Image (spheres, rainbow, N blue to C red):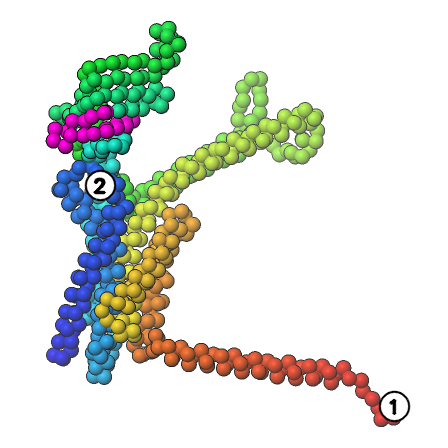
C-alpha cells in the first residue's frame, strides 16, 4: 500500500510540473494569436502601461478555455511517453499494476481540473469577457497617437491629410506643410499650404491647434455660396495669410465604455442568467407567434365581409353561407374575372409580406436564443473536453512511448487542430440554425470520445497500434482472405457455367 502511494505521488509530481509548463506555453501561443487579431486597436494609440496590462490580463482569461484542453493533451502525452521511453511503464505492468490503476490518480486530478474549468467559465470568464470587450470598444474609439511622418501623408485625423517635407526634431517645427481637408466632402475640398507651422494640443486634450505661417489656402465654393455672391465664374476661394490657426477635432484622451452595455449579451452571463434569459425570451417569442397567427387567422383568412351601402360589416358566424367558388367565378364576366384575379393576387402578396414581416420579428428572438444556448453548452463542453483529451493523450503516450517535445508536440497540435475544426464547424452549424444547438456544440465531444475509448482499450491491452509490422501482417491477412474469396468466387462461376452448359446440351437417345 505504501508503494502504491509513492507511485501516485511520483506520477502526480511528474504530471503537474508538465501540466503547468504546457499550460503557460499554450496560453502564450493563443494570447499572441489573440493580440495579433487586435493589433490594429493597440498600435499607435499611445496607451498607458496600465491599460495594456489590463488588456493582457483579460485576454489571458479569455484564451484559457482553449489553452486548458491543449495543455492537458500535451502534458499527458509527454508524461506517459516519458514513462514508456524509460521503461517505467513496463516495470509497473510487470509488477501487476494495470494501466487503469496507473491512470487513476491522474484521472482524479483531471476531474478536479474539469470541475474547476466549469466554475472558471461560469463565474470568471463572463466578467472577464465583458471587461475585455468594453475595453476593446474603448480602444477602437481612441484616436491614434499624433506622430506626423516626414515625406509622406499622415491620415490619422478623420477627413484630414497632412504632408510635411521636413521636421525639426528639437522644437518640433514643421516645414513645407500641406493640408487637405475633406470634412465637407470631396467636391468641397480645401487645400492649405504654408512655409512653416507648429502643432499644439488644447488644455483639455480634445482639439489639435495648428499654427501656420506664410501660406495660402484654396477652397471650392458650394453652389449656395456661388448663388449668394453671384460669382459663378470663380469656382474657388483663395486666401493669403502670414499667420493662421486651424482647430481640428482630435480627442487624445482615453474614454472607457460603460460595461453595462454588455449586460444583456451572452458573453457576460453565467449558467443561471443564461437559462433565465432563454426561458423569458422563449415565452415572449411563443406569445408573439400566437398573437401573430391569431391575427392572421382572424383578420386575413376568415375575414369575409358583405356590403350594406358604403359600410363594410363583418359577417357573423351564424350568417355565413357556403358558396361554390368555381361556379361563382364562371358566372362572372371577363372584366369581373380580371378584377377578381388582380384583387386575389394583391391580397396574396399582402399576406406574404405580413408573414415575412412576422418571421423577421421572430428571427431576432430565435437568434438571441441560439446565442445564449450556444454559450450555455460551451461551459459544459469545456469541462468534458478536458477529460476527453486526457483519455486521448495518456493512452497515446503509453502506446508510442516517446517523450520530450518532439513527436508529442506534433501529435498534440494535429489532434488539437482537428478538434478546433470540428468544434468550429459545429458552432457555425448551431449559430446558423442548421443544427440544434446541443448537437453543434457537442459535436467535437461526440467525435473524440470514441477515439479516446479506442486508444484507452488499445493501451490497456498492450496493442501495437503504431507498429508497422503489425499493420503489414494485418494487411497480408486481409489480402490473403480477399484472394481466397476471389478463388472461391471463380470456382463458383466455373461450376455455374458447367451446370448451364450441361443443362443446355441436347439429349440423344441410343436408338436415334
The answer to if 245 sits in the magenta stretch is no
- Mark 1 element type: loop
Query: Relative to 380, is 326 above or below?
Result: above
Image coords of residue 490 (percent x, y) = 61, 81
Bin the neighbour count of mark 1 within 10 Å (Cα to Cα): few under 14, some 14-19, many 20 and up.
few
Q: Quadrant of the C terminus?
A: bottom right
Residue 212 makes an appearance in the image: yes
Foreground: 80 or 408?
408
The answer to if 159 sits in the magenta stretch is yes
The segment highlighted magenta reads 158-177
Q: Nearer the viewer, mark 2 or mark 1?
A: 2
Marking on residue 457: none
Foreground: 130 or 189?
189
Question: Dividing the picture into quarters, in which one does residue 473 lie?
Answer: bottom left
Bin the neighbour count of mark 2 within 10 Å (Cα to Cα): few under 14, some 14-19, many 20 and up.
some
Query: Relative to 413, is 253 above or below?
Result: above
Residue at 45% from the left image edge and 34% from the top image edge: 357
Tell me which secondary structure the magenta stretch mostly adopts: strand
Query: Relative to 66, is 470 above or below?
Result: below
Cα distance between the residues tagged 2 and 1: 109 Å
Which residue has dot 2 on it?
42
Residue at 40% from the left image edge and 40% from the top image edge: 363
Residue 118 makes an appearance in the image: no
For the residues labelled 2 and 1, say whether their Cβ atoms are less than 8 Å apart: no
Image coords of residue 213 (percent x, y) = 19, 19
Reading the chain from its start, which is encountered first: label 2 or label 1? Answer: 2
Amino acid at each position: 500500500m505504501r508503494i502504491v502511494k509513492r507511485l501516485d505521488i511520483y506520477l502526480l509530481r511528474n504530471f503537474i510540473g508538465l501540466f503547468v509548463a504546457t499550460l503557460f506555453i499554450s496560453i502564450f501561443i493563443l494570447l499572441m494569436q489573440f493580440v495579433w487579431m487586435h493589433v490594429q486597436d493597440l498600435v499607435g494609440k499611445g496607451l498607458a502601461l496600465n491599460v495594456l496590462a489590463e488588456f493582457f490580463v483579460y485576454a489571458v482569461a479569455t484564451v484559457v478555455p482553449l489553452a486548458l484542453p491543449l495543455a492537458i493533451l500535451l502534458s499527458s502525452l509527454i508524461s506517459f511517453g516519458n514513462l514508456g521511453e524509460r521503461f517505467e511503464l513496463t516495470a509497473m505492468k510487470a509488477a501487476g499494476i494495470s494501466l487503469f490503476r496507473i491512470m487513476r490518480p491522474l484521472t482524479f486530478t483531471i476531474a478536479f481540473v474539469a470541475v474547476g474549468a466549469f466554475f472558471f467559465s461560469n463565474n470568471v470568464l463572463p466578467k472577464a469577457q465583458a471587461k475585455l470587450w468594453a475595453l476593446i470598444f474603448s480602444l477602437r474609439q481612441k484616436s491614434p497617437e499624433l506622430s506626423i511622418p516626414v515625406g509622406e501623408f499622415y491620415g490619422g485625423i478623420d477627413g484630414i491629410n497632412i504632408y510635411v517635407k521636413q521636421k525639426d526634431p528639437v522644437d518640433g517645427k514643421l516645414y513645407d506643410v500641406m493640408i487637405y481637408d475633406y470634412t465637407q466632402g470631396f467636391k468641397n475640398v480645401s487645400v492649405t499650404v504654408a512655409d512653416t507651422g507648429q502643432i499644439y494640443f488644447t488644455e483639455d486634450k480634445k482639439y489639435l491647434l495648428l499654427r501656420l505661417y506664410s501660406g495660402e489656402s484654396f477652397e471650392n465654393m458650394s453652389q449656395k455660396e456661388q448663388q449668394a455672391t453671384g460669382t459663378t465664374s470663380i469656382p474657388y476661394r483663395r486666401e493669403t495669410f502670414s499667420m493662421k490657426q486651424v482647430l481640428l477635432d482630435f480627442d487624445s484622451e482615453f474614454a472607457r465604455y460603460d460595461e453595462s452595455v454588455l449586460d444583456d449579451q451572452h458573453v457576460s452571463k453565467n449558467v443561471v442568467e443564461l437559462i433565465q434569459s432563454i426561458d423569458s425570451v422563449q415565452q415572449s417569442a411563443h406569445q408573439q407567434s400566437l398573437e401573430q397567427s391569431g391575427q392572421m387567422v382572424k383578420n386575413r383568412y376568415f375575414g369575409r365581409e358583405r356590403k350594406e351601402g358604403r359600410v363594410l360589416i363583418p359577417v357573423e358566424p351564424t350568417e355565413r353561407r357556403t358558396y361554390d367558388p368555381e361556379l361563382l367565378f364562371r358566372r362572372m364576366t371577363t372584366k369581373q374575372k380580371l378584377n377578381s384575379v388582380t384583387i386575389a393576387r394583391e391580397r396574396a402578396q399582402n399576406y406574404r409580406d405580413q408573414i415575412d414581416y412576422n418571421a423577421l420579428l421572430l428571427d431576432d428572438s430565435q437568434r438571441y436564443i441560439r446565442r445564449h444556448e450556444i454559450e450555455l453548452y460551451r461551459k459544459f463542453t469545456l469541462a468534458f473536453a478536458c477529460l476527453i483529451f486526457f483519455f486521448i493523450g495518456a493512452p497515446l503516450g503509453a502506446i508510442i512511448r516517446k517523450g520530450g517535445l518532439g513527436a508529442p508536440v506534433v501529435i498534440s497540435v494535429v489532434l488539437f487542430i482537428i478538434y478546433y475544426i470540428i468544434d468550429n464547424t459545429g458552432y457555425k452549424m448551431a449559430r446558423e440554425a442548421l443544427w440544434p444547438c446541443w448537437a453543434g456544440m457537442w459535436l467535437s465531444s461526440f467525435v473524440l470520445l470514441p477515439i479516446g475509448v479506442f486508444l484507452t482499450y488499445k493501451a490497456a491491452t498492450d496493442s501495437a497500434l503504431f507498429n508497422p509490422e503489425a499493420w503489414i501482417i494485418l494487411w497480408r491477412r486481409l489480402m490473403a482472405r480477399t484472394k481466397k474469396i476471389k478463388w472461391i468466387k471463380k470456382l463458383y462461376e466455373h461450376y455455374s457455367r458447367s451446370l448451364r452448359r450441361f443443362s443446355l446440351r441436347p439429349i440423344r437417345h441410343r436408338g436415334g
